[in-house]
Image (cartoon, grey):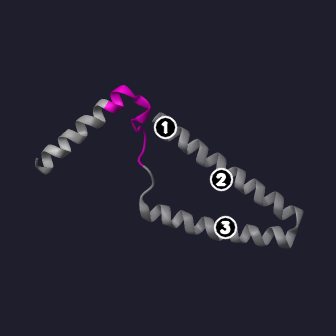
Amino acid sequence: MGTEDTRQEFDGIVERLTADYPSLARTGTAPWPRPLLITVLIVGGVVWAFLSMAMVAWGLRGVVLTCAVVLGAVAALAIRNYRWRTGR
């Protein structure tokens, strides 16, 4: 069996599975490209380090700031995930 035959067979299997189970089909935009993901992770790590220092240096104000930033990031990712799944 050649590579092209294997690929066609695989595509047929995926097509049948997504027809039977629509939740398996990916809609919307593709996941982030690798360089962008690495950049976001590095920036996130640096921001987390500064927020950790703020919690120690500023006490309760730093904790409130950290909680607000974390909740904002979680909300942004939840909205992005929802839009990606629904194709908006």
Label located before the other in sequence (2 or 1): 2
Residue sticking out furthest to the right: 60
Residue displayed at 48% across by 37% down? 85
- Cα–Cα gap, marks 1 and 3: 28 Å
Picture coordinates of residue 52, whole percent (x, y): 75, 69
Q: Label 2 amino acid?
A: Ala
Q: Which residue is mark 3?
A: 47
Q: Residues within 10 Å of mark 1 (few under 14, many from 20)?
A: some
Disc 3, SS: helix
Q: Label 1 amino acid?
A: Arg
Q: Label 3 amino acid?
A: Val
Q: Is residue 84 magenta?
A: no
Label located before the other in sequence (3 or 2): 3
Q: Quadrant of residue 69?
A: bottom right
Residue depth check, mark 1 versus mark 3: number of the one nearer the observer:
1
Q: Residues within 10 Å of mark 3 (few under 14, many from 20)?
A: some
Residue displayed at 34% across by 27% down? 19
Task: Pick whichever, 77 or 19, lies toward us.
Answer: 19
- Cα–Cα gap, marks 2 and 1: 18 Å
Query: Any mark on residue 73, and which?
Result: 2
Q: Is residue 30 left or right of residue 7?
A: right
Q: Which residue is mark 1?
A: 85
Q: Where is 83 relative to 41, above or below?
A: above
Q: Quadrant of residue 81?
A: top right
Q: Is residue 29 magenta?
A: yes
**Residue range of the region highlighted in magenta in the rendering:** 17-30
Q: Mark 3 and 2 residues: CB-CB less than 8 Å, in contact?
A: no
Q: Where is 85 relative to 2, above or below?
A: above
Picture coordinates of residue 50, whole percent (x, y): 72, 71
